[in-house]
Amino acid sequence: MIIDYKYHIASLVAVFLALGIGILIGSTLLGNDALVEYQKQVTDRLESQLQSLREANEAIQARANTLELDASIHKQFEKRVLPALVAGRLAGKKFAVVELNNYGYPPELIEVLEKAGGEVTSVTAVKTPLNDSKLLAELVGELQWQGTADEKLVTKLATEIACGIVSGENRELFQYLQKRELVRTNGQFGIPVDGVIIVGGDYKETKRDLQFDLALIDYFKELNITVLGVEETDVAYSTMKDYQRKQISTVDNIDTAPGQLAVVLALSGQPGNYGIKPSARMLLPEIKMQETEKGVK
């Protein structure tokens, strides 16, 4: 990061001009050598300060260049090492991804799961929150949910969507929500999965209603399906602490190599709350060497 000293330099230039005018006026009208000498001393001090600012700016520029080089080296290292660390840890396992942050997720999330031998069978993006009273009233009429208490409608909606993800049922509901642009889907539904990854977090400062998220988690847990809550580092509001109240594993930095490694390790049998935010217990679990037929890998 380079500090912008344009404002400081402009201020110093203005002071020099003012001093120059002052020296001219003082020497012409007053003829006071002491005043002129004092003004020259002030000018010298200001020149010294300006030189210090230049030197500080050059030092900061050099430091920024060094940090940029370090970051580039770290990224290259992570790119080379990460595949070796995750290889085979999720072999044969299938996962469903449910996106609830209205923003998306880094493609590296899917890539690292595949590098670990896993398969993402479906991705469901749900526009949240789905607690609008008008929308819920329309759903009651359209899907014949009469008799469901108002306060349970969001839970019912979450449960029906979760059921559709794991069983392939409730196609009418999915079609209706897709038509309303409230849900987007990709992949195959109804395939048994070993885990569900819920992409949470919020890019708005205010906390949204998480009733839908928590109902999803409850449904998958009742089926003994592993649930992992994840989010990116720079979300404005973290949902990890709320998810943790449901006793599930979380990773709060999936846009980084350590976060992607934590995702694989958590899904491969090392549950925990990983990341860099206050809700995390540690950055990563212990990285255990894998055993193969030929010995230790």
Image (cartoon, grey):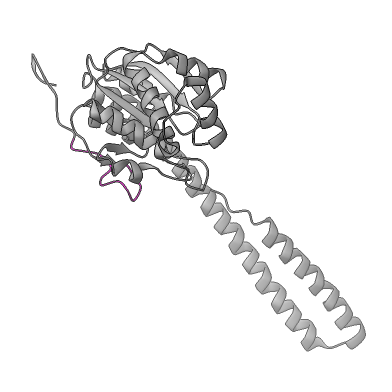
To which quarter of the image does residue 138 belong? top right
Q: Is 41 on the left or on the right of 282, as rendered? A: right
Q: Which residues are magenta?
A: 275-286
- Image position of 204 with respect to 191: above or below: below
Q: Is residue 257 visible?
A: no
- Image position of 242 with respect to 33: above or below: above
Viewer-proximal residue among 173 and 11: 173
Residue for point 26% across, 37% down: 248
On whether residue 284 falls in the magenta region, the answer is yes
Residue for point 50% across, 15% down: 175
Residue for point 43% across, 34% down: 154
Viewer-proximal residue among 11 and 113: 113
Instruction: Find residue 55 and report its horizontal and vertical position in percent.
Output: 57, 58
Magenta stretch mostly in which secondary structure?
A: loop
Number of numbered discs: 0
Residue for point 45% across, 45% down: 237
Q: Is 146 on the left or on the right of 274, as rendered? A: right
To which quarter of the image does residue 220 belong? top left
Q: Is residue 55 visible?
A: yes
Instruction: Find residue 53 and report its horizontal and vertical position in percent.
Output: 60, 61
To which quarter of the image does residue 263 belong? top left
Residue at the far right: name it.
Answer: 29
Instruction: Find residue 150 and report its horizontal and vertical position in percent.
Output: 45, 37
- Image position of 6 with respect to 154: above or below: below
Viewer-proximal residue among 287 and 46: 287
Residue at the far front: name it.
Answer: 147
Quadrant occupied by the C terminus: top left
Viewer-proximal residue among 29 and 235: 235
On whether residue 196 falls in the magenta region, the answer is no
Instruction: Find residue 210 and report its horizontal and vertical position in percent.
Output: 41, 40
